[in-house]
Image (tube, rainbow, N blue to C red):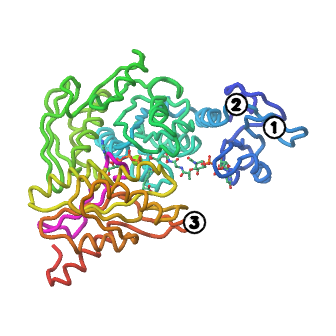
Amino acid sequence: MPALHAVAAAVAGCVSGESFEVRDITCLAGACQPGSIFAALPGTRADGHDFIPEALSRGAQAILSERPAPPDFPAAWIQVADARRALGQVAALLHGHPSHHIHVIGVTGTNGKTTTTYLLYEIFRAAYGHAALLGTIEQRMDDDRRPSRLTTPEAPEVQAFLRRAWDSGCRHAAIEVSSIGLDRWRVADMRFAAAIFTNLTQDHLDYHGTMERYFDAKLRLFDGRNGEVPGIAVLNTDDARTPDIITAINGRARIVTYAVHDPGAEVRLARLDVHTRGMALSLHTPRGMLDLATHLVGTPHAYNILAATATALALDVPTDAILAGVANTVVPGRFEVVEGSDDHLLVAVDYAHTPDALANVTATARELARLRRGRVITVFGCGGDRDRTKRPLMAEAAAQGSDLTILTSDNPRREAPERILDDAEVGLRAVGKPYHRILDRRQAIAFAIQTAQPGDVVVIAGKGHETYQILNHLTIHFDDREEARQALRRLRSDKGTPME
Ligand SMILES: CC(=O)N[C@H]1[C@@H](OP(=O)(O)OP(=O)(O)OC[C@H]2O[C@@H](n3ccc(=O)[nH]c3=O)[C@H](O)[C@@H]2O)O[C@H](CO)[C@@H](O)[C@@H]1O[C@H](C)C(=O)N[C@@H](C)C(=O)N[C@H](CCC(=O)O)C(=O)O
Ligand SMILES: Nc1ncnc2c1ncn2[C@@H]1O[C@H](COP(=O)(O)OP(=O)(O)OP(=O)(O)O)[C@@H](O)[C@H]1O
Ligand SMILES: N[C@H](CCC[C@H](N)C(=O)O)C(=O)O
Ligand SMILES: [Mg+2]
């Protein structure tokens, strides 16, 4: 365990008070113990400095802060220029810089991060037996799975996870790197063997303010501001922002390109057949044409498969492991076909919660509905306490891609649910196609399924894998897949036909 003064020196901090052997660092006062440094951070709801007495009562022996030490402070104090960044740097140091010992692949972009990390996890497991995964749904180390609270958690949690992965024999970790995580230095000073850019479209403007600032946060993963430039930058050349990333890298990293459309990309799509339960793809690659099969459904997932394949090829993963990994990948809540769906009625649950994702998922549904001579019915809502300006755009995308749209509630959090629906309804009115507004999500799902005709495809968008609904301070159990299954069951028993 390093001494306090060594830790302070590593972050160019001004230190006062007695030195001690540092065990850990945290920004949560409740998690402090003897040997801890408590990072006191200003927040949106509270000020970490108000929790210093609690941190000390739990045994914290030093405070890390941007403020100078108060006179006669009873413990050590490290004053730094940027406390969040220092929290990230110290967390990496205390865990022995696990990213220097395992190959960490960081995935950033508005959509596709979770899916791409799942693909990489399966590819690494097929190739080497061990792999780690960290992101929106879960933190996984081989077969050990724990649910996540944030996509990219605070730095001490990320570093502790990577350290455990290293200790348990994993040499590859695929992690989702959110723009908020980058902005808050949650992956500060990490070495990325590869960094993947999926795409940039509107989200999180409540946090970043403008698209430029949102993009700039993502750019930090590539241009060295986060610590180092990645070993390999894997970039989607169909996305308009990729040239800006290449410029910012300025020749300092190896660049690998992938695309569905761009004929100049190194790894690109040659053929795509979309079915209800999966897809067949052929990719042009530096190793020749690869034919793959996947359970994932929809063109967006072709991008994610291209990104994961391009990365694995650049890291010299054997081809058979890439094919096996892609074939094995199942991501909960990403065009997940609900049990009880059949040739007459297809119901899919999808995590689309941005305008772009809704445009894409309804396009996938349209492709399948055309084959079945049916319509597209989409149920969607918008989360509360999140980007308000994306709501009418989500509604427009849903309505444009659907024959019938049902606007409902998502996770209202601390906002008034009806107001969230009002914001979204503006987009539905602008499009002018048929829609219903049903506040209660259970009723909305049931209505969509009852209304569907033979051949129709029903998409239930926004919550995907989530098994809860956040209503103000209350979190209740809610699972779109269970709701859809029950509605299908009721439909079949009303009509007297058994479920397949
Ligand atoms: C905007 C954001 O990221 N907020 C996170 C942030 O809150 P904050 O900075 O406002 O902190 P605060 O609650 O005001 O408290 C101030 C300080 O006092 C400390 N404190 C506070 C209360 C207490 O009892 N004890 C204590 O020590 C807090 O740890 C904090 O350091 O630090 C908190 C502690 O770690 C997080 O719980 C909180 O995540 C909130 C819940 C959240 O919803 N974050 C989302 C928006 C997020 O980070 N999402 C991204 C992107 C998702 C994606 O699209 O992929 C993600 O990576 O998950
Ligand atoms: N490459 C892609 N391009 C566009 N849309 C995509 C792509 N991949 C997935 N999607 C859509 O976005 C939804 C979310 O996908 P995924 O969970 O992989 O993204 P994410 O970036 O991890 O999202 P989050 O920011 O919430 O963590 C999917 O359900 C699908 O509708
Ligand atoms: N990672 C996304 C999750 C959105 C999921 C949606 N169900 C919502 O609650 O808005 C976010 O934090 O914006
Ligand atoms: Mg995710």
Residue underneath mark 1: 76
Give the residue at x 73% y 43%: 35
Q: Would you identify the image quadrant in which residue 406 lies? A: bottom left
**Label 1 neighbourhood size at 10 Å, few (<14), some (14-19), many (20+)?**
some
Instruction: Give the Cα distance between marks 3 and 1.
Output: 36 Å
Task: Identify the image quadrant of residue 256.
Answer: top left
Please state which of residues 35 and 393 is positioned toward the viewer in this rendering: 393
Badge 2 or badge 1: first in the primary sequence:
2
Q: Nearer the viewer, residue 75 or 306?
A: 306
Instruction: Give the amino acid type for the residue marked by disc 3 in the picture.
Output: His
- Mark 3 or mark 1, which has the lower sequence index? 1
Answer left or right for 212 relative to 243: right
**Image location of residue 486, percent across then percent down:** 29, 75
What secondary structure is marked by label 1?
strand
Q: Secondary structure at mark 2?
A: helix
Residue at screen point 37% across, 37% down: 200
The kind of residue tagged 1 is: Ala
Image marks 3 and 1: residues in contact by CB distance under 8 Å: no
Let me know if residue 153 is in the magenta part: no
415 versus 244 height, above or below: below
Identify the mark at residue 7; answer none if there is no mark.
2
Q: Give 308 or 50, whichever is nearer the viewer.
A: 50
Depicted 65 relative to depicted 384: above or below: above
Q: Which residue is mark 3?
A: 473
Q: Amino acid at mark 2?
A: Val
- Magenta segment range? 334-357
